[in-house]
Image (cartoon, rainbow, N blue to C red):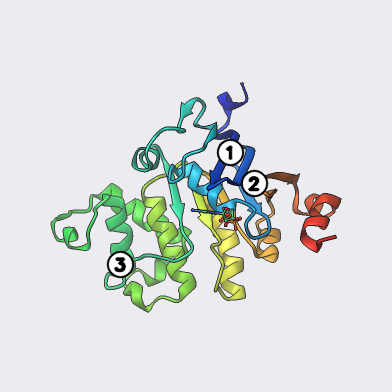
Amino acid sequence: EKAKNSLLYLDGVSVSFDGFKALRSLSLVIEPGEMRAIIGPNGAGKTTMMDVITGKTKPDEGDVYFAGDTDLTRMDEASIASLGIGRKFQKPTVFESHTVWNNIDLALAGVRGPFATLFHRTSLRETARIEEILDIIRLADKKEWLAANLSHGQKQWLEIGMLLAQEPQLLLVDEPVAGMTDAETRETAALLREIAKTKSVVVVEHDMSFVRELDVKVTVLHQGSVLSEGTLDAVSADPTVIEVYLGR
Ligand code: ADP
């Protein structure tokens, strides 16, 4: 019932590693067009949760539904990605020796290796989409730059752009602002909010000033399940959250 209208529904997901429960009956609902921040102390299960959504890790118990009633639980990673779930890992992986524009073009073409660009002709429609993505990721004025010459933060944006080129419905983002300057961090919040106008976004984050800037509903994970959910102010005032973070 719940699953029918939501984009992502984790229903009582449990994952164990050698008897250690990384996720304990975790349930989570993400609505279409929603951006959600996932926070929690180290070892809370944030990475394992992302791994379950993308199919890298299979639950021992529970189910994962996408776009209503598509059951992802037993699908392989490639099939899940092709349904429209994109994941941005912490470390940016861009083609350093290619221009910014070319990086997006390659991603758009779904081309696997950098050499295939020689044989690919970009259509007018694709060119328009590339320009649109460059605007979103704040790199329109650097489209002729080699990716190697971008700052760390700009490389992160470029990789987000490469994911956008694949037109996911759900974008999973792992600690996007780690290592960014304050200005880049603020810009990242703005660009993710822009992306969330047309897609659902799940952000795992440690940086609380960034989470505040995102200004979205927050889910606090602890010991593999949901400890608290609500605005950042609400979860920050939740005694169970204070206890976990301050160890009292
Ligand atoms: P977080 O991302 O919130 O820091 P993780 O999902 O990485 O938490 O980890 C949750 C718990 O599961 C941790 O205690 C971690 O040591 C354990 N864990 C994660 N992956 C594995 C694995 N592949 N094998 C064994 N234990 C793991």
* SS of the residue under disc 3: loop
Q: Residue at x 40, y 53 (%)?
A: 163
Residue closer to the observer: 135 or 34: 34
Res. 10 in view: yes
Residue 185 left/right relative to 106: right
- Tell me the tag on residue 95: 3
62 w.r.t. 175: above or below: above
Q: Amino acid at mark 2?
A: Gly
Image quarter of the C terminus: bottom right
Quarter residue 233 falls in: bottom right
Q: Quadrant of residue 146?
A: bottom left
Mark 2: secondary structure: loop
Residue under numbered circle 1: 14
Numbered disc 1: secondary structure: strand
Which residue corresponds to mark 2?
A: 224
**Spot occupied by residue 84 in the image (x, y as percentages of width and height):** 41, 40
Dot 1: within a 10 Å radius of its alpha carbon, few (fewer than 14), some, or many (20 or more) residues?
Answer: many
Q: Earlier in the sequence, mark 3 or mark 1?
A: 1
**From mark 3 to mark 1, how far is it between C-alphas?**
37 Å
Asked whether disc 2 touches disc 3, contact meaning CB atoms under 8 Å apart, the reply is no
Q: Amino acid at mark 1?
A: Ser
